Image: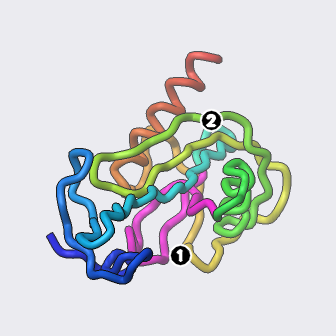
Amino acid sequence: MTTTGSDKFCASCATPLEMRQQDGQPRPVCPACGRIVYFDPKLATATIIERNGLTLMVRRAVLTGYGLWSMPGGYVDRGEVVENAAAREVQEETGLLVKVQHLIGIFSDADNPVVVAAYSAQETGGLLAPGPECLEVGFFPPTDLPPLAFPRDAEIIARWRAIRDSTA
């Protein structure tokens, strides 16, 4: 395994890094000073908004999952409150203002650096329109969704439905 990008040279002594097994994982390690590079996960949000029994979905206009559908969401900025990031992403992608209500769950996969915090939210205003990262927006029955961009989207919807149905 080779190193690339920001993990190519040691931040302490500028020696080229080598990949070594460290703590059960291949990690960039400096052979000169022993510094170990630990990669942090990326935190993203996904938000479910329900209207008249239908679920809001966005058709993606960005490379990962281009043309497929997902819940409104995106990356959390460093220092940003996660719930605020969820509401911001909904507004950026759909034009809607929302109040984040409940955490549906935290979703992660092995060998995937993205961790998703999924929430439910209630519309509070705005005008529904696709943002610059979306081809279109629409509401769909949660049991008959369009082709999804990410496998975990189906898991998020299923968990949300189970929580919703258990409290009804």
Of residues 141 and 103, which is closer to you in this image? 103
Q: Is residue 134 above or below residue 71?
A: below
Quadrant where the N terminus is found in the figure? bottom left
The residue at the point 71 percent across, 48 percent down is 83
**Label 2 vs label 1, nearer the camera:** 2
Residue 57, magenta (yes or no): yes
Q: Residue furthest left?
A: 1
Q: Is residue 10 above or below residue 161?
A: below
Instruction: Say whether residue 95 is left or right of residue 137.
Output: right
Q: Which residue is mark 1?
A: 135
Q: Are marks 2 and 1 in contact (CB under 8 Å)?
A: no
Give, as a single range, the part of the protein colored magenta: 56-77
The image shows residue 129 at horizontal and vertical percentages of: 69, 70
Could you tell me the amino acid type at mark 2? Leu
Which element type, helix, strand or loop, lies under badge 2? strand
Residue 125, magenta (yes or no): no
The image shows residue 17 at horizontal and vertical percentages of: 26, 75
Q: Which residue is mark 2?
A: 103
Q: Quadrant of residue 102?
A: top right
Could you tell me the amino acid type at mark 1? Leu
Specify few, some or many for label 1: CA neighbours under 10 Å numbering under 14, 14-19, or 20 or more.
Answer: some
Which label belongs to residue 100?
A: none
The image shows residue 160 at horizontal and vertical percentages of: 53, 33
Instruction: Say whether residue 73 is left or right of residue 13.
Output: right
Can residue 139 be spotted in the picture? yes
The residue at the point 56 percent across, 21 percent down is 165
The image shows residue 7 at horizontal and vertical percentages of: 34, 75
Q: Earlier in the sequence, mark 2 or mark 1?
A: 2
